[in-house]
Image: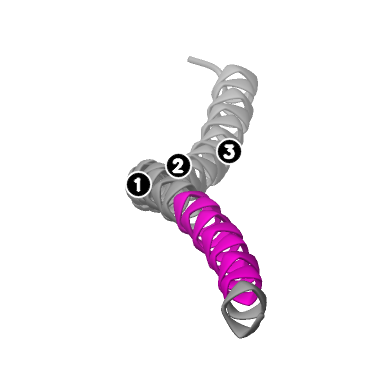
């Protein structure tokens, strides 16, 4: 082989080595970027798990609030029934009192008439 061909081959080989070296650097950068993407993905998965855990906690708290509301409504219904019962009893007592006062007034009038009648 001639010197020119050898030099040309050396130049081509040198160019190939440079190209491969550049490709190696690019490959290293791509690998680094891939690692960063994997790390970001891992971080996002952790954040997603935290969000899901928060959602579960909020769902449990919401369920507790709903259960408490049901209990409050039941208590309110019982209290309303008792209040109605008390009002009915008070109404009956008022009617009884009015009746007693009416009888007392009538009796007082009759006693007054008897006193007047007996004194004559």
- Residue 102 within the magenta-colored segment of the rendering: yes
**Mark 2, other Cα within 10 Å: few <14 / some 14–19 / many ≥20:** few
Q: In the rendered structure, which disc, 3 or 1, sits on the residue that comes first in sequence?
A: 3
Residue 96 appears in the figure = yes
Q: Which residue is mark 1?
A: 78
Res 110 quadrant in image = bottom right
Q: Which residues are magenta?
A: 91-114
Q: Which residue is mark 3?
A: 26
Q: Residue at left 49%, top 62%?
A: 100
The secondary element bearing badge 1 is classed as: helix
Provide residue 72's location: percent of width, then percent of height: 40, 51
The secondary element bearing badge 2 is classed as: helix
The Cα atoms of the two marked residues, 2 and 1, are separated by 55 Å
Marks 3, 1: nearer the viewer: 1
Which colour assignment does the render follow? one colour
Q: Nearer the viewer, residue 14 or 85?
A: 85
Where 11 sits versus 22, above or below? above
Q: Residue at left 48%, top 15%?
A: 1
The secondary element bearing badge 3 is classed as: helix
């Amino acid at each position: 082989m001639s010197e020119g061909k050898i030099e040309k081959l050396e130049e081509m080989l040198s160019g190939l080595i440079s190209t491969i070296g550049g490709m190696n650097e690019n490959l290293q950068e791509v690998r680094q970027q891939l690692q960063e993407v994997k790390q970001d993905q891992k971080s996002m998965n952790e954040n997603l798990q935290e969000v899901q855990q928060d959602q579960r906690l909020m769902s449990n708290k919401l369920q507790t609030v709903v259960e408490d509301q049901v209990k409050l409504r039941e208590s309110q219904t019982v209290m309303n029934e008792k209040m109605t019962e008390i009002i009915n009893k008070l109404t009956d007592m008022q009617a009884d009192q009015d009746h007693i006062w009416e009888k007392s007034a009538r009796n007082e009038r009759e006693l007054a008439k008897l006193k007047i009648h007996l004194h004559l």
